[in-house]
Amino acid sequence: MSKPFRELAQLCEKLEKTASRKEKVEAVASFLKSFNDPDEASKAAQLLVGLHTGTRRKGLNVGPSTLYKALATVQTPLIHPNPLTVSEVWDALEKIRKLTGERSTLMRRQMLSGLFAKADEAEREWLVKVVMGEMRHGVNLGLLLEALATLASTPLEKIRAADMLLGNIGLLVKTVLENRLEEVGLNIFKPVKPMLAEFAYSPAEVFKKLGRPVICEPKIDGVRVQVHKKGLKVRVYSRGLRDLTPSVPDIVEAVANGVHASEIILDGEVYGVGADGRPLPFQETMRRVGREKDVMRALAEARLEVRFFDILYCEGVDVWMQPLSDRRQRLIEYVQGDLLVPAHTVSAEAEVERLLKTWLEAGYEGLMAKAPGSGYTPGRRGGFWLKLKQADTLDVVVVAAEWGHGRRAGWLSNYLLAVKDEEGGGYAPVGKTFKGLTDDEFRWMTEKLLSIKTAEHDWGVEVRPEVVLEVEYDEVQKSPHYSSGYALRFARVKRIRTDKQADEIDTLSKVRHAFMKSRRISPG
């Protein structure tokens, strides 16, 4: 029998009034253990922490406006003949999450209103918090992992490791409740999501976050790959876990000849090489890697090379939790030198600056800085890898803004950026960003943008082009999603330019020139 949602709401009320972390952990563990169906327990656990999908992506694309309208149109029956269940709530939110198209906003509102109508007052309060992803009862993902460790009577580190390998909190809960934790591990030819890096904007920031010394490597602007080898068999997987092997026979050959282990899982980067021996731009590499037809002709057009920088598994041993410095030694032991990303251990800002300059001049994208004692965290930004690049900047204007989710809920905090279209007139969108601002700046931006809005939507507002931002970006890419035809990759707000007017911002021709320069295309 399905568990009433009322019991989840009652647990949330209890957690909200409980100060002790230990008591919270025990309460959550006891609640999850009370389920007869592991699938439903998995759904309850995700709702408990404000998730609508197991992969940590918060948000249902439901803004405050839709939520308030849904609540305003609720027609509450005098009697609730059938209590609302956990599975009913989860399934309804799943349907809402998947809605797309012109009438999706109206349908979301109607479906939410229907869901709220089936709930009593206490249930409705927690339903709203679930929808917004803001539970405010002190149970986050970390505490949920502690509860699972208590439930399974196993060390927390084992739960954390399983969580990273599975990459799905719902699947982890189900695995624990079905006593299948021992089945979780690295397996040859079953790829896991790669460890991710965060940005740093100066050598000083690198050392502030990672301490001293750090391991520095050139950042290759290529395609991230995970390579599995067992005996003579080699498979190459993308960061999205797609099997690329048929498209990259040159990489398979390089691994077969240059990796000396019977069983191994490696992390690396594949990149195209031009006639001058320098790395090709990312999009050209993507075109080569993505070729599924005429592969032999593609081989003649652009040569691919691979460089490895990490090792996850070797000769029957999971090594991903070992310190990076130890993993690097294993890498050197089993992988031929010309297939390795060079690495330097440095302790001074000047050394980082020198390496960055050297690698930029050699055609690399920038520099990676890594903590020597750090483990490998599949699918996570653990804060132990930092990207340092030479960022370009543009002055742009905000033409629309979306409501934020999670920590940014209640703020207009995802900005549509535009440059001046000096040829066609008006402003040309070149991307979005929510990165770079403090909480106080988000508040200021929200008040300012609401004061100059020209249209309001469920997702946010359109505004008069008055707020100028200076943004840093990685590179300019071609994009069909914006009328300008271009998008700023990894845009980040450097500062709010209250000293500038909209007619002083940069132009579309400058964006176009930046794109051509990065691709070595002559403007003429």
Image (cartoon, rainbow, N blue to C red):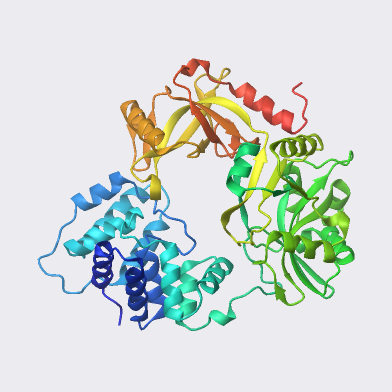
- In percent of width and height, residue 225 lies at 72, 58
- Residue 478 seen: no
40 to 451, vertically: above or below: below
* Whether residue 39 is visible: yes
Residue at left offset 57%, top offset 69%: 161
Q: Residue at x 40, y 55 (%)?
A: 99
- Dividing the image into 4 quarters, which one contains the N terminus? bottom left
- Residue 269, position as x, y percentages in the image: 75, 53
Q: Is residue 18 left or right of residue 519?
A: left
Quarter of the figure with residue 205: top right
Image spot of residue 409 (x, y percent): 36, 46
Instruction: Give above or below for 205 relative to 422.
Output: below
Q: Quadrant of residue 382?
A: bottom right
Q: Is residue 136 above or below residue 35?
A: above
Q: How many marks?
A: 0
Which residue is located at x 39 percent, y 54 percent?
60
Residue 57 x/y as whole percent: 46, 56
Q: Quadrant of residue 29?
A: bottom left
Q: Is residue 71 left or right of residue 487?
A: left
Residue, far left: 78
Which of these two is toward me, 296 or 140?
140
The quadrant of the rendering that contains the C terminus is top right
**Is 310 located above or below residue 442 in the figure?**
below
384 and 273: which one is in front? 384
Q: Is residue 471 left or right of residue 152?
A: right
